[in-house]
Amino acid sequence: MRAGDSFKERKVAAWRGDAQLSGKVTDEAGKGIPDAKVTFIFAQVNDGFFATTKKNGEFSAKDLKGGEWRVQVEAPNFVTVRQTITIADSKNPPLELRLKRDNSPELIAAAESLYKAGKYAEARTEYLKVLEAHPELTGINRAIAFTYGREGNHAEALKYLDLALANNPNDPLLLQLAAASATERGDYPRAMAYLAKIDDTTMTDSEVLVSAAISLINKKQTANAIAVLDRAIARFPGAPEPYFLRGFARLQANNTAEGKADLEKYVSIAPSDAPQLAQAKELLAKVK
């Protein structure tokens, strides 16, 4: 196909010139790939055209301006290739573009199987292969973070969670996981910052905040735990567990009066088979 399929006809003159270019798109065995889409972008104006390969994988383009061009090659079942080339003002040597078979679906399936089997390092290796071939699949960062989290390597888990959050900054699950990893690392300001970004309207129950509060209580971060539980109670005033946990945390902080009030509230609304009911009554019996 000649260089005539412009994205924006109003700019077509900006990349037209006297240069010619031909080339071939092949697989790893050197066999031509038909119907591959070869996109050319003239860097100076960020505009260009695309060509489609013939049955033997060859393509050609005419009337190009010399200079720097960005090339992208796409074909079904192959990994997309991107590179920058310099085109001379006249005839240019043939461009050889070799594509690798895209085995990402198989790699993802293998990684998931390894993860379920508890082989986290092996699963991570497969996920990283996918990410190398497809950096645009940013969701893979979350899967890699899971493998590190399972191993207790929360520093690396956070690194990949932050990469995932860069593309999905409001994802409540990513924020919850990041907060949990930051808490395990003892980076409490960072954990609270992640939790603060979770939109209350995305929560259908108090579980996310309760889980975060329990982790903070276990780390003796009483003030932070109470702040999280204040938020849980404001959002879900009818949920019993946040009252029990806040009461427990307030007693830890020697705030007896408010701790007692929270525990009494919990006892009044908790179902009869609530797991903390006996403990709440025992604590109340000890409070003067």
Image (cartoon, rainbow, N blue to C red):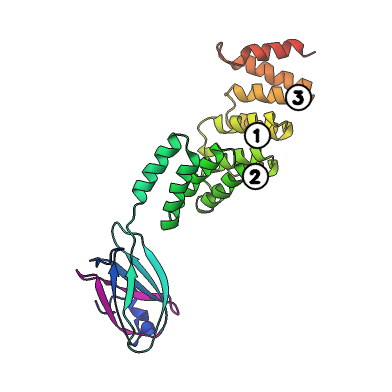
Q: Where in the figure is residue 67, as x and y percent of width and height? A: 42, 83
Residue located 77% across and 20% down the image: 257
- Is 70 rendered above or below residue 143? below
- Is 133 rendered above or below residue 30? above
Provide the secondary structure element on which disc 2 rests: helix
Numbered mark located on residue 252 in the image:
3
Q: In front: 195, or 63? A: 63
Residue 145 visible in this rendered orientation of the protein: yes
Provide the secondary structure element on which disc 1 rests: helix
Of mark 1 and mark 3, the one earlier in the sequence is 1
Q: CA distance from mark 1 to mark 3?
A: 16 Å
Of mark 3 and mark 2, the one earlier in the sequence is 2
- Is 114 rendered above or below residue 21? above
- Is 74 rendered above or below residue 179? below
Location of mark 1 (residue): 228
Residue located 52% across and 35% down the image: 203
Q: In front: 209, or 154? A: 154
Q: Where in the figure is residue 48, as x and y percent of width and height? A: 36, 76
The amino acid marked with disc number 3 is: Gln
Location of mark 2 (residue): 193
The amino acid marked with disc number 2 is: Ala
